[in-house]
């Protein structure tokens, strides 16, 4: 991470302040999903000088699996890529989750998100399963949207032990 650009990571409580992070959340997920979880869970905000939003991670506890936290959305402003901010933000969020007693973290990304797949593996996540035909119009996803020339079809789930 570039040391001459100080950043901070903070929790943003549910409420109107979270609206400022919607553009970043939309980098990671479709609008119907963002609207559904925006006011739920823990929102970790990465802020730069003058408190400008640089990144965001929204974490939801997995109610079906106590002790597990799902990283529902992880995103860095595209103008801030390749500075180590995403790596630093993710490591900080995982450290906080560990300190709060979570034993496992999970995250999912599209089969077309080649960069995201590499990012999570470099951060110590391992592929745990593939959910075929996840990105459907019924869930609010555009069937014609592509990334890296690939259609978004399957969700690749990763996990990492935090203990």
Image (tube, rainbow, N blue to C red):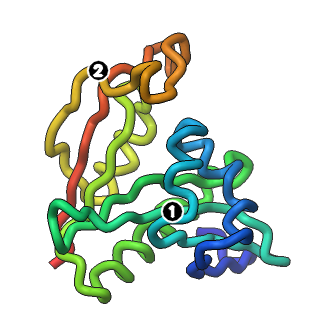
What residue do we see at 33% from left, 44% from top?
A: 108
Residue extending farthest right: 50
Q: Residue at x 49, y 14 (%)?
A: 143
Relative to residue 109, is residue 20 depicted above or below? below
User: At 21% from the left edge and 55% from the top edge, which residue is drawn?
Assistant: 159
- Frontmost residue, 145 versus 85: 145
Residue at the bottom extreme of this rendering: 99
Residue 77 location (% of width, % of height): 68, 52
- Check the picture and name the quadrant holding the N terminus: bottom right
Is 123 placed left or right of 63 in the picture? right
Q: Is residue 89 left or right of 129 when viewed as pictured?
A: right
Mark 1, other Cα within 10 Å: few <14 / some 14–19 / many ≥20:
many
Determine which residue is flagged by label 2: 133
Residue 84 shows in this picture: no
Please state, as top left, top right, bottom left or bottom right, where the C terminus lies in the image: bottom left
Q: Quadrant of residue 61?
A: bottom left
Query: Foreground residue, 76 or 25?
Result: 25
Residue 5 picture quarter:
bottom right
At x 74%, y 73%, the residue is: 48
Left/right placement of residue 84 relative to residue 115 reads right
Element type at mark 1: strand
Q: Secondary structure at mark 2?
A: loop
Residue 42: % across, % down: 47, 72
| Above or below 148: residue 2 | below
- The numbered disc on residue 12 is none
Kindly identify which residue carries mark 1: 57
Q: CA distance from mark 1 to mark 2?
A: 25 Å
Answer few, some or many: residues within 10 Å of disc 2's Cα (few below 14, many 20 plus, some between 14 and 19): few
């Amino acid at each position: 991470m570039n040391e001459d650009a100080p950043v901070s990571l903070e929790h943003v409580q549910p409420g109107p302040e979270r609206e400022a992070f919607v553009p970043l959340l939309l980098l990671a997920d479709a609008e119907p999903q963002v609207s559904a979880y925006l006011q739920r869970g823990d929102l970790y905000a990465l802020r730069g000088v003058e408190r400008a939003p640089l990144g965001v991670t929204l974490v939801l506890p997995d109610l079906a699996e106590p002790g597990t936290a799902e990283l529902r959305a992880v995103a860095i402003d595209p103008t801030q890529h390749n500075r180590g901010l995403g790596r630093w933000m993710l490591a900080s969020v995982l450290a906080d989750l560990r300190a709060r007693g979570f034993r496992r973290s999970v995250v999912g990304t599209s089969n077309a998100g080649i960069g995201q797949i590499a990012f999570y593996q470099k951060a110590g996540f391992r592929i745990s399963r593939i959910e075929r035909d996840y990105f459907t119009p019924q869930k609010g996803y555009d069937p014609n949207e592509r990334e890296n020339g690939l259609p978004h079809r399957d969700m690749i789930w990763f996990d990492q032990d935090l203990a």
